[in-house]
């Protein structure tokens, strides 16, 4: 298992981080439309982020074998940087989920993506 990212991990991890962002936004929007509830300030957005990050890390681990955990780490760091950019650019009158776009969302994106990459690499070794 290699956790030191290379340039190839960066090239694959950047779109994977964007995939986490788009998947989280899409799934939370669809869930809000289907239920008619407002998830803008609840923990549901954080749970959706954790699930999306873990699944993306798992796919990276399955696809990249030995380099999967490093690719998942880059993907987690990418989504954390995206959330930090939104958090820093937010104005006081903007309505956003502070759990998702704040420090909890940034940390959980990394902490859920890397174990998914490790599990995917382990599953790839056994098969």
Image: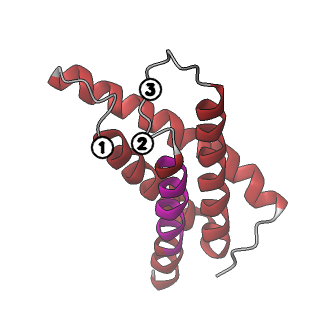
**Residue position marked by numbered label 3 in the rendering:** 96
Residue 18: where, in percent of width, then height?
60, 39
Q: Is residue 26 above or below residue 4?
A: above
Q: Quadrant of the C terminus?
A: bottom left
Spatial distance from mark 3 to mark 2, Cα to Cα?
A: 9 Å
Quick check: marks 3 and 2 in contact, CB under 8 Å?
A: no
Would residue 57 appear left or right of 37 to someone viewing this image?
Answer: right
In terms of image quadrants, where is residue 43? top left
Of residues 127 and 54, which is closer to you in this image?
54
Would residue 126 appear left or right of 70 to someone viewing this image?
Answer: left
> Which badge, 1 or 3, is on the more N-terminal residue?
1
Residue 86: where, in percent of width, then height?
60, 31
What residue is rendered at 64% in x and 82% in y? Answer: 1
Of residues 71 and 78, which is closer to you in this image?
78
Spatial distance from mark 1 to mark 3, Cα to Cα?
A: 12 Å
**Residue position marked by numbered label 2 in the rendering:** 99
């Amino acid at each position: 298992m290699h956790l030191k990212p290379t340039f190839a991990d960066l090239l694959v991890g950047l779109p994977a981080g964007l995939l986490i962002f788009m998947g989280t936004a899409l799934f939370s929007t669809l869930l809000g439309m289907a239920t008619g509830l407002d998830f803008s300030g609840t923990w549901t957005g954080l749970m959706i982020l954790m699930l999306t990050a873990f699944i993306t890390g798992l796919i990276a681990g399955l696809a990249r074998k030995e380099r999967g955990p490093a690719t998942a780490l880059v993907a987690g760091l990418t989504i954390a940087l995206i959330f930090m950019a939104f958090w820093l650019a937010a104005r006081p009158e903007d309505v956003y989920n502070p759990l998702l776009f704040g420090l909890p969302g940034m940390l959980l994106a990394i902490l859920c993506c890397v174990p998914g990459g490790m599990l995917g690499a382990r599953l790839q070794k056994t098969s």
